[in-house]
Amino acid sequence: MEAVPSRHHSIADDLRHQITTGRIKTGERLPSETQLAGQYRVSTPTLRNALAVLQGEGLVEKIHGNGNFVRRPLRKITYVGGWGTLDPWTAADAALRVTVRTTAIRARGHLTALLRVPNGTPLTEFLCLSHEGESPHSLARLYVPRDLTPTSVLGDGTSSEGVVTRFAMLSPPPAEVRETVCARLPRPDEVSTLRISSAVAVLAITRVAADSAGRVVEAALLVFPGDRVDAVFTTHHVIEERQTQG
């Protein structure tokens, strides 16, 4: 016996059809949830479940205080593993606008382990949020020991946009870069900041860079919605030539 689709899935199917056929245009605001619930003759919770399906598919975006909108397709970006290939917040893509907030903090909890420093060590935190148009695209938190932070960018709690300078300001480049990649569900603050559904998986990358003496010079916590990024990692094998003495 074939299962009968639930009511909220039927509503999602109808709205999806209207969006994909262009009856509801890209960027258009949907009727209010109350109006849609009345139109489909269902309760508001059922209607919200239908919208959640479309939000999870990336077709609809809910903007707090403004309503639900048909989302403009976001281009995928490519995160290239390693050091010096692509800025950690993906600012290499000229179409992305980046907001950066710098703050002076002290190492606590997991940061002490990531940066291999004692509790209370002075750090500079860079909170980077990239946008495509008005839609958030990716989130990055970078942590640099305070004594390695150039005075020109020392955190004072202010924000700036359009930053073009790399955060990889270190010279020489790190001797070792270690990246840990996982797919997981977003945390509540990431759901709010990136304006995504709590059911949409994110790609989370933890990158730790160290110098030749083993000191961690930067730790980066990067978060990308899973439908907006491809990650590429390339390994170069160095073959040493050995000369045979005759």
Image: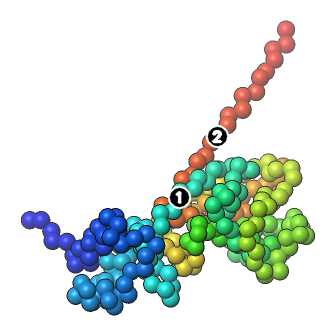
Q: Residues within 10 Å of mark 1 (few under 14, many from 20)?
A: few
Which of the 4 quarters of the picture holds residue 102?
bottom right
3D distance between C-alphas at marks 1 and 2: 26 Å
Q: Amino acid at mark 1?
A: Arg
Q: Amino acid at mark 2?
A: Thr
Identify whether 235 is placed above or below 177. Answer: above
Left or right of 230 on screen, residue 4: left
Residue 128 at x, y percent in the picture: 69, 70
Name the foreground residue: 76 vs 182. 76
Left or right of 70 on screen, residue 134: right
Which of the 4 quarters of the picture holds residue 25?
bottom left
Residue placed under numbered mark 1 in the picture: 75
Residue 114 at x, y percent in the picture: 71, 65
Q: Residues within 10 Å of mark 2 (few under 14, many from 20)?
A: few
The N terminus lies in quadrant: bottom left
Residue 93 at x, y percent in the picture: 65, 57
Residue placed under numbered mark 2 in the picture: 235
Asked whether the viewer can see residue 216, the reply is no
- Residue pictured at 84% horizontal, 56% vertical: 170
Image disc number at residue 230: none
